[in-house]
Image: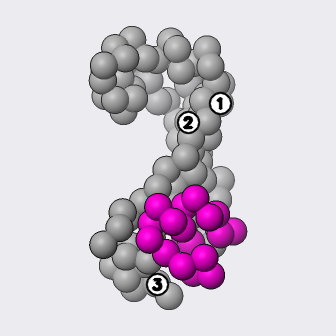
Amino acid sequence: MGDFLISKNSWNKEAYEGLMKNKGEAIGTNMKRQKFENFREINFAGIAENDKEVTTSLEMKDDETLLLRNYYFWNGGKRVAVIQEYFSKEVKKVLNVE
């Protein structure tokens, strides 16, 4: 069985460098420690265009449907990151979505 989720993200360089106080820890740990995320805005949830890198990583066929959630992290009134989460067919089975 492959992974359930692949995440891609893009960060504002200044915000990222300010956030990563301890580069030996995961980004999520740094965010929690600094109470960094003030607001998360989901701007898309649904069916995604197939992405060869994602379908390969999730052990899916190229013609299988991907579920996608796309959202922004906001901090201090500024959008600092865009996150894209692609969900595998295994997640679709758990959610009873086909």
Give the amino acid type for the residue marked by disc 3 in the picture: Val
Label 1 sits on a secondary structure element that is strand
Residue denoted by label 3: 97
Give the amino acid type for the residue marked by disc 1 in the picture: Arg
Residue 13 percent coordinates (x, y): 62, 19
| Side of 96 where 73 appears, left or right | right
Crowding around mark 1 (Cα neighbors within 10 Å: few <14, some 14 to 19, many 20+) is: some
Q: Are marks 2 and 1 in contact (CB under 8 Å)?
A: yes
In the rendered view, tell whether residue 68 sits above or below residue 11. below
Q: CA distance from mark 2 to mark 3?
A: 27 Å
Residue 4 percent coordinates (x, y): 37, 65
Give the amino acid type for the residue marked by disc 2 in the picture: Phe
Q: Are marks 3 and 1 in contact (CB under 8 Å)?
A: no
Q: Tell me the quarter of the picture where residue 5 sits.
A: bottom left
| Side of 89 where 69 appears, left or right | right
Specify the segment rendered in magenta: 49-67
Among the two numbered marks 2 and 3 on one chain, the one whose residue lies closer to the N terminus: 2
Residue denoted by label 1: 79
Residue denoted by label 2: 73
Residue 77 seen by the camera: no
Does the stretch in magenta take in 56?
yes
Residue 64 seen by the camera: yes
Q: Residue at x 64, y 63 (%)?
A: 51
In the rendered view, tell whether residue 91 sits above or below residue 3. below
